[in-house]
Image: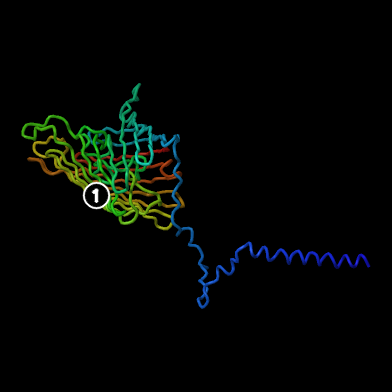
Amino acid sequence: MFEATRSRTLPSLVAVALAMTVPWTASAAPDLTLALQPPPGEPLPPVDTAAPPPADQQPPTPPVSLGGLKIEGSGASLKLGFLFQPSYELASGSLTSTQPIQHFFVRRMRLMAGLTLGTQFEFFADTDSPNIARNTNVAPSSGMIVQDAFMTWKPMDEFKLDGGMMLVPFTHNSVQGATTLYAWDYFASSFNQSAGFGNSAGRDVGAQARGLVAGHLEYRLGVFTGNRGAAPMGANNSRAEMRITARVQYNIFDPETAFFYAGTYAGAKKIVSFGAGIDHQDNYTAFAVDGFVDLPVGADVLTAQAAFLHFTPGTPPWIVVAKQSDVIVEAGYRIAALKLSPIVRFEDQLFPAVGMADSTSTLRVSAGLAWWPMGHNLNVKLFYTYVKPPGDAFNQLNLQVQLYVF
């Protein structure tokens, strides 16, 4: 009897305990079912049952950019980086000789530093040891130069002020950073004016205002030292005139907001832009127009750029740049599954007739492959180039590896 009573009492106690617990639990937790119901009289929202797009149609996943050493302080940070580009070159001749060329060399070796102070001030500097052992023996002490050294005050997106030694604004390709080039190097005419100004690869010392207006229109306006040499007889003998450069670029989709443009964003941005630039001092003037495309196509990326450049040195020439009109074109397609980009390039430098001499041109046609195992941090580029100067044509093969962290 006692056993039977206990067997009936135990379930009863459990039932009472559950009954006391359920009201407290319901009052403590929100009724999610009711909260998700639409107002009376309105239909239930549709349920998205569409399958995800195939893998080859999904947007590309940009490679993770590996950063350099970063030191954090109170209101300040220091970032250190490194660029190394060992290269191999084989050519059947050159612009000045028909002698075959073959060598290993280091195209670039750079140390980079970026300093941030608070939220409005930045400083960037890098050194460079370019073309070590290119067409020469390795010297006991290869020269190292300061490539860039400038600070930036950025109170707002619409206005930033740079001061120091930097790339002057002109074409999209000439403002690209060497760390993010698409092909193995710049175009031959990207820095045509450097020798005439005595500059290093398109740099000059001065100040530049830049900004992004309405999220799409970028402007760059710079005042630089330019050429300080004495002007020849008949030219403006004043050495006080400064070099004025300017560039405007309209971005249809994503803007390019960094100081250095990239040769490709590997799908991280959707870029279609059109730009124009001018470079002037005394009786020298150059202008350029260009376009740049870097668009995701499913999981792949289409990249292309084109530009027209014209240089007028004036009479008599003070800034010694050959009068010319240049056309550059570059196009490639990144195959995500292979991390591989076939790339073609075309460049033609057209020199007008001078006196009794006929007009001439230097034509370059290139085709190559870029392999991106780790994006811009680690890549390998192999390019063949056919060069037809006014003299004998020659062929050129370049292989380059890039290791980069910042």
Q: Nearer the viewer, residue 268 or 238?
A: 238
Provide the residue designation for mark 1: 248
Picture quadrant of residue 164: top left
Q: Position of residue 394 (x, y in %)?
A: 27, 40
Nearest to the observer: residue 120 or residue 103:
120
Label 1: element kind: strand
- x, y percentage for residue 40? 53, 76
Residue 69 seen anywhere in this rendered image of the structure = no
Assess disc 1: are there few (<14), some (14-19) or many (≥20) residues with their C-alpha within 10 Å of its C-alpha: many
Residue furthest to the right:
1
Q: Quadrant of the C terminus?
A: top left
**Residue situated furthest left in the rendering:** 234
- Residue 261: x and y in percent read 32, 45
Please name the residue shown 40% across and 51% down the image: 268
- Classify 328 as above or below 138: below
- Side of 281 where 154 appears, left or right: right
Q: Residue at x 29, y 50 (%)?
A: 212
Q: Is residue 96 visible?
A: yes
Q: How many numbered dots are placed on residues in this image?
A: 1
Q: How is the image coloured?
A: rainbow
How far across and how far down the image is residue 26, in percent? 65, 65
Q: Residue 65: which quarter of the image?
A: top left
Q: Give the amino acid at mark 1.
A: Val
